Image (tube, rainbow, N blue to C red):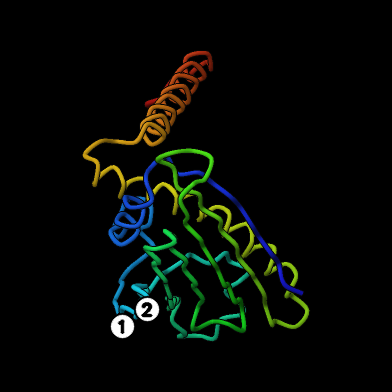
């Protein structure tokens, strides 16, 4: 049994900018779990497509229940292969990623396709697909559920990281990132106000010095 995920999104930027930002998206403050990235292969084909293979090292904190499936001393780092095809003629970027290690615990395969939007000018359409599986006998279903939930959470960070790279290229902060920053600050201010109000209404016990 394999868990399948699919999402579609429109990026408010031209395909050329998105492709440029794709190569410059690390490091960024939303993907601190990505430790290293290295190009291991690159080729331009006769039909002008750019083929690339990169090796990335990532780390993800495991929940306590997952620690039992890791042998003592085994590395928590995950090595990821990322293959990509840039097709300037058809104006598409397709990426394939999968993990090299820890595949018995969980295997995650992802495919992303970036294309010029047909309906909206200066917009890039992104289709993201993922297949999540586990070979841990008796626990594969909950592990896959956990993997799917984490993938959904991480893809939101991935999009913010791409927007961050786009903002660096364009020399401005994207409006969505700005809204998120203001929203986070407002929520923290409200929480602080609630804490102060609660502290003010709770009667204080007199201090005793003897």
- What residue is drawn where x is 32% and y is 83%? 41
Q: Is residue 61 left or right of residue 1?
A: left
- Examine the image and state in which quarter residue 55 appears: bottom left
- Position of 79 relative to 59 (above/below): below
For the residue labelled by badge 1, is the local secondary structure a helix, a strand or a loop? strand
- Image quarter (top left, top right, bottom left or bottom right) of the N terminus: bottom right
Name which residue lies at 75% across and 70% down.
141
Residue 142 in the image, given as x and y percentages of width and height = 72, 67
Determine the residue positioned at 31% across, 78% down.
44
The local crowd at label 2, few if under 14, some if 14 to 19, many if 20 or more residues have their Cα within 10 Å, is some
Front residue (pair 191, 173) = 173
Give the number of callouts. 2
Relative to 149, 192 lies left or right: left
Q: CA distance from mark 2 to mark 1?
A: 6 Å
Location of residue 138 with respect to 118 vertically, above or below: below
Disc 1: CA contacts within 10 A as few (<14), some (14-19) or many (>=20):
few
Give the image quarter of residue 174.
Answer: top left
The first of marks 2 and 1 along the sequence is: 1
Quarter of the picture holding the C terminus = top left
Which label was assigned to residue 101? none
* SS category of the residue bearing label 2: strand
Does any portion of residue 209 appear in the rendered image? yes
* Residue appearing at x 36%, y 31% in the figure: 178
Q: Position of residue 120 (x, y in %)?
A: 49, 38
Nearer-the-camera pick, 167 or 2: 167
Point out residue 73 in the picture as x, y percentages from the top left corner: 45, 85
Q: Does residue 205 show up?
A: no
In the picture, residue 91 is in which quadrant?
Answer: bottom left
Q: Which residue is mark 2?
A: 53
| Mark 2 touches mark 1? (CB < 8 Å) | yes
Identify the disc placed on residue 40: 1
Whether residue 84 is situated above or below residue 119 in the rendered picture: below
């Amino acid at each position: 049994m394999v868990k399948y995920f699919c999402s579609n999104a429109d990026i408010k930027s031209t395909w050329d900018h998105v492709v440029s930002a794709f190569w410059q998206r690390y490091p960024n403050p939303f993907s601190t779990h990505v430790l290293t990235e290295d190009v291991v292969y690159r080729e331009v084909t006769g039909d002008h497509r750019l083929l690339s293979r990169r090796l990335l090292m990532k780390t993800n904190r495991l929940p306590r229940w997952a620690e039992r499936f890791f042998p003592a001393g085994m590395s928590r780092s995950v090595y990821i292969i990322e293959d990509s095809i840039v097709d300037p003629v058809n104006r598409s970027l397709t990426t394939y990623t999968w993990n090299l290690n820890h595949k018995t615990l969980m295997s995650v395969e992802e495919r992303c396709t970036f294309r010029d939007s047909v309906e909206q000018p200066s917009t890039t359409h992104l289709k993201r697909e993922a297949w999540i599986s586990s070979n841990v006998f008796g626990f594969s279903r909950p592990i896959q559920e956990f993997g799917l939930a984490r993938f959904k959470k991480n893809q939101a960070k991935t999009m913010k990281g791409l927007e961050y790279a786009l903002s660096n290229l364009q020399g401005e902060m994207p409006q969505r990132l700005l809204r998120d920053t203001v929203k986070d600050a407002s929520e923290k201010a409200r929480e602080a106000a609630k804490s102060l109000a609660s502290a003010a209404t709770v009667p204080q016990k007199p201090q005793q010095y003897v």
